[in-house]
Image (cartoon, rainbow, N blue to C red):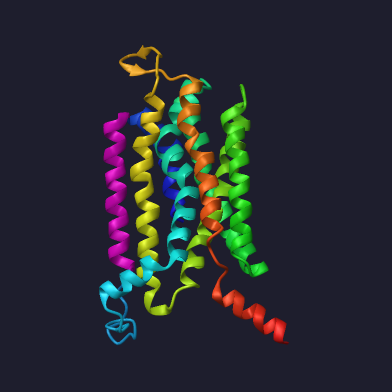
């Protein structure tokens, strides 16, 4: 559901900006935000006051919970795996994807936006499918491993293919979103390997890594894009060559490799281990 925002932010928003200019598009965007706020106000409710969730104490002091969660290597490695696998969404979809397609493959802005949105669409399809497969086979690590390996291959195709068609690029961007959606398994891998009283804290520590990583890597990708740039300026904006984007996009296969390294330190769910032990004893 969250990825629908990424889909709408690409092609639909570009079409909106073409028809109403960017100020009008942002104004409409703001009105939609007010509408969403109204829906939340009308339909989203707090838990009832007599609910067991309200006021329930875990018995774990704040700093003790933080310390235990940080010292759990499993949480840190799951956070790094999810963060590295999330990079295409955070960087290609959010920052450089449209520029790459317009400047290197000479596609229109609207068509480029539609192709970039395929990353989010692929994630919409892949996330529940990876979750279903993981539950079906009773494993978290194996689907995460497959997703990491496949992500390297798809990203190299995007980087190295010469003169691909718009349809091929759409398929590759969709596939990139699909295979990197294995990152969603990092979340149950965290919750299933922590005591109930530390589930929220552990997820928070992992989220700090997942959301903090783009804050560092987004500007790094920009530095790599500009590093050694010798292109021309078009209406005051730099025109980048394929080699510039390849240098910046080298972050992704390296990041996927690092995700696999982090995954090697992730242990299978305790619940799954317990099921295996029961099967073995039976």
Vertical position of residue 204 compared to residue 58: above or below: above
Along the viewing direction, whichever of 74 and 143 lies nearer the viewer: 74
Picture layout, residue 225 above or below residue 263 = above
Q: Is residue 69 visible?
A: yes
Q: For the point 58% across and 32% down, which residue is it?
A: 158
Residue at 31%, 69% in the rendered image: 66
Can I make out residue 124 in this image? no
Quadrant housing the C terminus: bottom right
Give residue 230's position: percent from left, percent from top.
40, 14
The range drawn in magenta is 21-44
Identify whether 134 is placed above or below 170: below
Q: Position of residue 19 (x, y in %)?
A: 37, 29
Q: Residue at x 48, y 60 (%)?
A: 78
Q: Nearer the viewer, residue 216 or 56?
A: 216
**Residue 75 in picture, x, y percent from top left:** 44, 64
Labels in figure, total? 0
**Which corner quadrant of the image does residue 128 belong to?**
bottom right
Please name the predominant secondary structure of the magenta segment in the image. Answer: helix
Asked which quadrant contains residue 271, the reply is bottom right
Q: Is residue 43 left or right of residue 183?
A: left
Q: Is residue 18 magenta?
A: no
Q: Is residue 43 magenta?
A: yes
Q: Looking at the picture, does residue 115 appear above or below residue 62? A: above
Residue 11: give x, y in percent of width and height.
45, 36
């Amino acid at each position: 559901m969250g990825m629908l925002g990424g889909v709408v932010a690409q092609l639909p928003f570009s079409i909106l900006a073409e028809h109403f200019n960017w100020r009008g598009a942002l104004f409409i965007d703001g009105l939609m935000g007010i509408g969403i706020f109204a829906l939340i106000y009308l339909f989203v409710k707090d838990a009832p006051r007599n609910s067991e969730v309200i006021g329930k104490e875990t018995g774990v002091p704040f700093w003790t919970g933080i310390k235990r969660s940080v010292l759990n290597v499993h949480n840190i490695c799951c956070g790094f795996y999810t963060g590295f696998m999330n990079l295409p969404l955070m960087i290609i979809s959010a920052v450089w994807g449209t520029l790459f397609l317009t400047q290197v493959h000479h596609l229109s802005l609207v068509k480029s936006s539609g192709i970039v949105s395929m990353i989010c669409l692929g994630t919409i399809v892949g996330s529940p499918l990876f979750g279903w497969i993981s539950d079906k086979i009773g494993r978290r690590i194996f689907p995460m491993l497959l997703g990491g390996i496949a992500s390297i291959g798809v990203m190299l195709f995007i980087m190295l293919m010469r003169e691909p068609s718009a349809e091929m690029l759409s398929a590759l961007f969709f596939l990139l979103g699909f295979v990197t959606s294995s990152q969603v398994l990092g979340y149950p891998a965290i919750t299933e390997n922590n005591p109930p009283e530390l589930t929220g804290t552990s997820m928070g520590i992992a989220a700090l890594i997942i959301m903090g990583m783009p804050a560092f890597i987004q500007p790094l990708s920009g530095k790599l894009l500009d590093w050694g740039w010798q292109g021309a300026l078009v209406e005051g904006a730099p025109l980048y060559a394929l080699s510039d984007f390849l240098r910046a996009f080298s972050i992704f296969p390296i990041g996927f490799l690092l995700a696999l390294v982090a995954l090697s330190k992730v242990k299978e769910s305790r619940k799954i281990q317990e099921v295996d032990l029961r099967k073995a004893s039976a």
